[in-house]
Image (cartoon, rainbow, N blue to C red):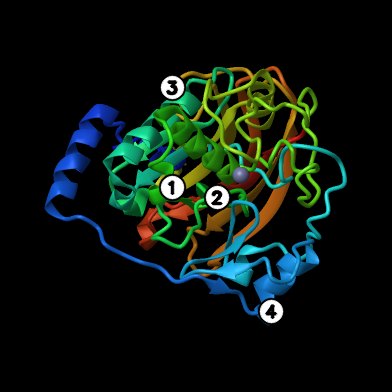
């Protein structure tokens, strides 16, 4: 009997996480904290000049004596975190982008617009509420593909928001870092003690500011603030004192007009790669497999509403193929395509293979993934 088989492998990568209402989460957290309060401290000391990451930070403009070290990170002025693993850095990049304000030049891939945020118990119940409000504000920016989802399982986190564990002085309210390899920076630390002296709006805005670093934003006033060079986003101003990415905290509305321009410029649409496999059976239970590879375009990382691409985007991707004839093993190759604005589905590639079930081969394995996608400003 002939069977028509369809495999949509890449669909497995999305839709795994249920969105649980924030209010419900908050109540759960309150109960957990009442039972098991978190007590933890960290150390903070001047970083060793010899560490390769510290050397790299010096080469990118930080002055000696300004880099500190904690258990998990290097701390750099004014509110930045850096991974201690040199492998997280692109050493061919000098970090010397020579234009003006706003982003790092390091972006989150457009196929990673769904961002899971875990809020650690160590920040306490008040800041947990503030962080939930920050996520709500970010998700409220229309025509911006970022979609933050609060998760209650730390293992699912793209970003963990946690306490500074006592290491910060009162002038640093929060810290975060910049994306690498198309992924968001994975940690926001909050100065729990110091933030307690501020109102809810400022506390919320601090969380938004730090999440802004995690997705690639520099300080709006980086130049006046003496920070290393950054990439300009057209339509934004280095004098926008109302910007959420101004280097000092403020209350009031979360976003300035320039902020909204910036978010929409860097995150225009959410891309998802979808593979549609067509199986055709020959005689003797041999199969011919044609995999059609598409990039589908969505309004945001919730992947609920298809939407036309609103600017040209280059996608770089890696195709990994497991041969059905297992003597050939696995092979992979890299390609890139320019997606021209105006459609919500782009055919980008195809792979074809034959599989012999009668020889004991399992005819279900075809893998392909976009490893990096970025917008062209
Ligand atoms: Zn900052």
Which residue is at the front of the view, 262 or 9? 262
* Label 2 element class: loop
**How far is mark 3 from mark 2, CA to CA?**
41 Å
115 vs 110, left or right, is: left
**How far is mark 1 from mark 2, CA to CA?**
8 Å
Q: Nearer the viewer, mark 3 or mark 1?
A: 1
Q: Examine the rendering and report whether any part of residue 172 can be seen.
A: yes
Q: Nearer the viewer, mark 2 or mark 4?
A: 2
Q: Residues within 10 Å of mark 1 (few under 14, many from 20)?
A: some
Determine which residue is flagged by label 2.
Answer: 171
Which residue is at the front of the view, 190 or 160? 190
Which residue is at the front of the view, 145 or 228? 228
Q: Nearer the viewer, mark 1 or mark 4?
A: 1
Residue 133 x, y percent position in the rendering? 39, 29
Instruction: Tell whether label 4 touches label 3 (CB within 8 Å).
Output: no
* Label 4 element class: loop
Mark sitting on residue 49: 4
**How far is mark 3 from mark 1, CA to CA?**
39 Å
Point out the tag, 3 or 4, that comes first from the N-terminus: 4
Q: Identify which residue is drawn at 14% across, 43% down.
A: 31
Mark sitting on residue 194: 1
Residue 87 x, y percent position in the rendering? 62, 69
**How far is mark 3 from mark 4, CA to CA?**
49 Å
The response on whether ligand 1 sits within 8 Å of label 1 is no
Point out the tag, 1 or 4, that comes first from the N-terminus: 4
Mark sitting on residue 60: none
């Amino acid at each position: 009997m002939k069977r028509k088989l369809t495999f949509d492998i890449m669909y497995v990568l999305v839709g795994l996480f249920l969105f649980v209402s924030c209010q419900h989460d908050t109540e759960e957290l309150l109960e957990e904290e009442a039972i098991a309060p978190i007590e933890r401290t960290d150390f903070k000391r001047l970083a060793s000049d010899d560490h390769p990451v510290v050397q790299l930070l010096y080469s990118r403009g930080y002055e000696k004596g300004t880099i500190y070290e904690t258990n998990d990170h290097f701390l750099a002025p004014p509110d930045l975190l850096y991974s201690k693993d040199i492998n997280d850095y692109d050493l061919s990049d000098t970090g010397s982008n020579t234009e003006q304000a706003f982003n790092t030049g390091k972006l989150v891939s457009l196929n990673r617009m769904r961002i899971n945020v875990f809020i650690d118990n160590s920040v306490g119940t008040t800041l947990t509420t503030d962080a939930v409000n920050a996520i709500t504000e970010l998700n409220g920016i229309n025509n911006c593909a970022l979609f933050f989802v609060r998760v209650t399982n730390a293992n699912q986190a793209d970003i963990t928001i946690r306490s500074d564990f006592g290491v910060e002085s009162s002038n640093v309210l929060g810290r975060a870092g910049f994306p690498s390899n198309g992924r968001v920076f994975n940690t926001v630390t909050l100065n729990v003690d110091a933030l307690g002296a501020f109102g809810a709006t400022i506390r919320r805005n601090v969380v938004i500011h730090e999440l802004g670093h995690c997705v690639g934003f520099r300080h709006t006033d980086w130049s006046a603030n003496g920070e290393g060079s950054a990439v300009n986003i057209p339509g934004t101003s280095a004098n926008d004192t109302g910007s959420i990415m101004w280097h000092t905290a403020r209350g009031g509305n979360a976003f300035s007009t320039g902020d909204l321009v910036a978010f929409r410029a860097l995150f225009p649409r959410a891309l998802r790669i979808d593979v549609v496999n067509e199986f055709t059976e020959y005689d003797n239970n041999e199969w011919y497999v044609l995999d059609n590879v598409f990039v589908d375009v969505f309004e945001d990382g919730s992947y609920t509403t298809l939407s036309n691409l609103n600017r040209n985007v280059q996608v770089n991707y890696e195709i990994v193929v497991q041969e059905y004839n297992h003597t050939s093993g696995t092979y992979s190759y890299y390609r890139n395509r320019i997606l021209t604005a105006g459609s919500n589905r782009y055919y980008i590639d195809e792979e074809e293979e034959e599989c012999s079930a009668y020889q004991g081969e399992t005819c279900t394995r075809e893998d392909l993934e976009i490893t990096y996608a970025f917008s062209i400003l």
